Amino acid sequence: MKWWLTTMLTITLPMVPLSDVPLAAEDKIVIAHRGASGYLPEHSLPAKAMAYAMGADFIEQDLVLTRDDRLVVLHDLYLDLVTDVARVFPDRRRDDGHFYVIDFMLAEIRQLALTERRVIKDGQTRPRFPGRFPPGQSSFRISTFEEEIELIQGLNRSTGRNVGLYPEIKSPAFHRQAGRDLSRAVLGVLQAYGYTARDDRVYLQCFDPEELQRLRRELLPELGMDLKLVQLIAETKWETTLVYQDGQTVPYNYDWMQTPGAMTKIAAYADGIGPWMGMIVKMNATRGQLVFSAMVKEAHAAGLVVHPYTFRAEKEFLPPYAVDFDDLLDIFYFKVGVDGAFTDFPDRAVNFLRREKGD
């Protein structure tokens, strides 16, 4: 999911005062966003093990395909910003400057070092999160979906817990243009590891509503599976989801998902939504004027769970209406009433919920 957007965008849903929202809800969950990514490089197996040890209820996997059709856990379609691919394979970049996962065999990807996310600004490469794990230190590698499932299932067996998976099907239209069926590949691995039923500990998420409808109406019935699906929601101008029209790529228009009645339409094919947190509470709201959209209320009325993204503890990511990270969690979990939250700091969210429950 997009992590770099902090600007407030237009909210078209009606706004609701805090007094109209229940102050408590049961069964709140913590979703480790790319693992314990606030402490270790995102999507590394150590980050996933750390998130497990911290008590996360679900651990996220972003999934893309390699050239030899292996599912690897990586947020981007390309390798540039989290590996040393430009050093190892300097001649493999495309015309747009990126090194795409789908152009590499798994054996080649295993040669790359995984590191903290970087950004390029003013021609300079720098860490995206300067206060996190130092880029280039220690040794991390990209893992396959199977390897991550085996880690989580192994820990479930050795600890007696039942931590779930939260995979994302990344850019299925891009893969389809390359002749690959990403969704079918993901379902094949899930089925092989025993995730087939609605009550299994897995949520399958995607930004592409057409792909989610295909999953619900075609692929899942065909394979005898019935998994919980989550519609991720982006702002249209982020260009998170590109669709192909007449040979051209255009951004999918998400505007309708922020209008009254949208949740009922989404509930026809999904079991939950994953909106950006700024769609629920205005990022420029103040503590004295804290209002939020009707999205959560309408989603719950339609039978959908709500799992917003992304909660980060660093001061620069705290919206002005939150005193600190615990206050931000309190606003969303108990004042707004969301059912779960994606966070880079699963320990902070787990400990907050435990204190609230009196554990």
Image (cartoon, helix red, strand yellow):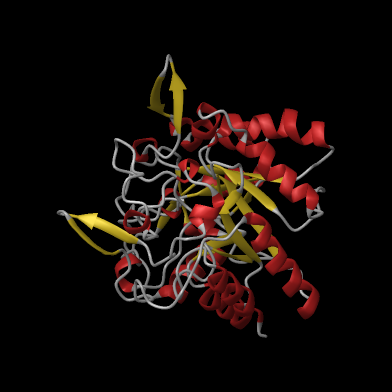
Residue 341 versus residue 302 in the image, above or below? below
* Above/below status of 148 relative to 214: below
Give how far across and how far down residue 244 sits, in percent: 45, 23
Relative height, residue 308 to residue 42 (above, below): above
Q: Residue furthest bottom?
A: 359
Can I make out residue 60 in this image?
yes
The C terminus sits in image quarter: bottom right
Q: Quadrant of residue 288?
A: bottom left
73 relative position to 226: left or right: left
> What residue is rendered at 66% in x and 62% in y?
147
- Residue nearest the viewer, comparing 293 with 98: 98
Measured as percent of width and height from the top left, residue 155 is found at 73, 74
User: Against 205, is 356 above or below?
Assistant: below
Viewer-side residue, 120 vs 27: 120
User: Can residue 160 be seen from the camera position used here?
Assistant: no
Q: Is residue 188 left or right of residue 111?
A: right
Spot the residue most to the right: 224
Q: Position of residue 73 (x, y in %)?
A: 55, 55
* Left or right: 35 in relation to 248: right
